[in-house]
Image (cartoon, rainbow, N blue to C red):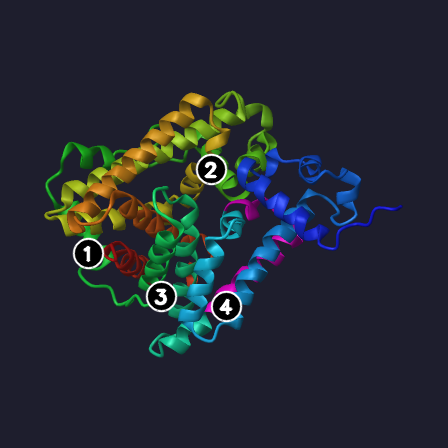
Amino acid sequence: MVARRPGDRKSQIEAAAAALFLQRGYHNVSVTDVAGRLGITAPALYHHYRDKQDLLHHVVLDGLDAVDALITRAASLDDALRSLVTFVLGPRRLLALWEREARHLRGPRRDAIRAREVQVAANLARLLRAARMELDAADAELIAWALLGTLGSRARWPSGRTLPEDARLLYRLGMATAYCGLAERGPSAVQAGAEVDDRPETPALKAAAEPAAGTRTGSRPSRRDQLLTEAVVMFGERGFQSVSMADIGRAAGIATSGIYRHFPSKTDLLVSASRQGVQRMCAETDRALSAARDPREALEFLLRAHIRLTMEFQHHIGIATDELAQLPDAERTALRRGQAEYLAIWATALAAVAPDRESADLRSVIEAAHSMIYLVVRSGRPELWPSLPGRLVALGMALLLSA
């Protein structure tokens, strides 16, 4: 008797691939690994997918299609939000996969995913405009991206709550994002920056104002700095394992052999990028806290600093989030410690404003704000929002104060 192929074999393959990509990262999973998870051979998998890129493309695309179906079927914004919360809390974590692994796609496949992302945001923006008639098209699209970022933060939340508790918190954060008033209260981003810079200079402010190690003030960047700058961009956009030393050398206009005079290996470039990001984060945090006069201002200045960091050093943020596994053990431990200390500073600042909330709730709210900011900046659409920093302050404070 001939065994029949299950009718849902493709969905089984994609579910197994999604789980492995999330667990190990795209480059650490082979087609044989995915096939082995299902007890089939690699040639049987190739019956459905041309290669691993094709498999990742379909996994990400199917996730975006599922999100879009929930949005387009929804009778209202509230209906869509409730459906999206249920979807995000499901076992496949496809929003997290889209955010972290889609960058490994190349050429037409990446372009197709990009077009699908924009369409999903546009459909969500239509629901937002139906619920909020005062929004213009650009602001509705901004809030749509922000809402997707808020919902996607669930993958990084701490444990300690039940699934219904997570659902209630995620829905509340989604509502805070969706109905945020984008007219920023308080000083503008430029005014706040000037206010920070005009205060008496502390040691932290002095350190923040000094050039980063290895830079040459008033002159062209050194070869080492050129290489590090190009590596940071490429690691952030394409992923550490998708980039070769030759790629970095070409981008910097330096022969591959010349790179090794400055960095013994690609891992050394990643370590330097990681340290550079942590140094900048510490300097901006010190600057924000030393300038604040009360708990509410401390929270807002931290938020403004984080927005500046994300907009100016987007790829450092991506490396710290997505490339931890590629760092040597000692550097990975140090980066995790730095990230934990950064979140603890935020949690202390938020607890001073919202003293009755549980620590796990505060951490989740902070992760939601950071995820929202990162996805909006990463969306590649900032040209639509010339006043983006102020709008991100309004969205971030709406999320933080929901605590």
Residue beneath disc 3 = 178
CA–CA distance between discs 2 and 1?
A: 30 Å
Residue beneath disc 1 = 191
For this view, does 236 lie left or right of residue 188?
right
The answer to whether residue 299 is visible is yes
Residue beneath disc 4 = 71
- CA neighbours of label 3 inside 10 A, class few (<14), some (14 to 19), many (20+): many
**Displayed quadrant of residue 19:** top right
Front position in the image: 168 or 225: 168
- CA neighbours of label 4 inside 10 A, class few (<14), some (14 to 19), many (20+): many
CA–CA distance between discs 2 and 3?
A: 33 Å
- The mark that comes first in sequence, 2 or 1, is 1
The residue sitting at 40% across, 42% down in the picture is 317
Residue type at the position of mark 4: Ile
Q: Position of residue 151 (x, y in %)?
A: 42, 56
90 in relation to 252, above or below: below
- The mark that comes first in sequence, 4 or 2, is 4
- CA neighbours of label 1 inside 10 A, class few (<14), some (14 to 19), many (20+): few
Residue beneath disc 2 = 232
- The mark that comes first in sequence, 4 or 1, is 4
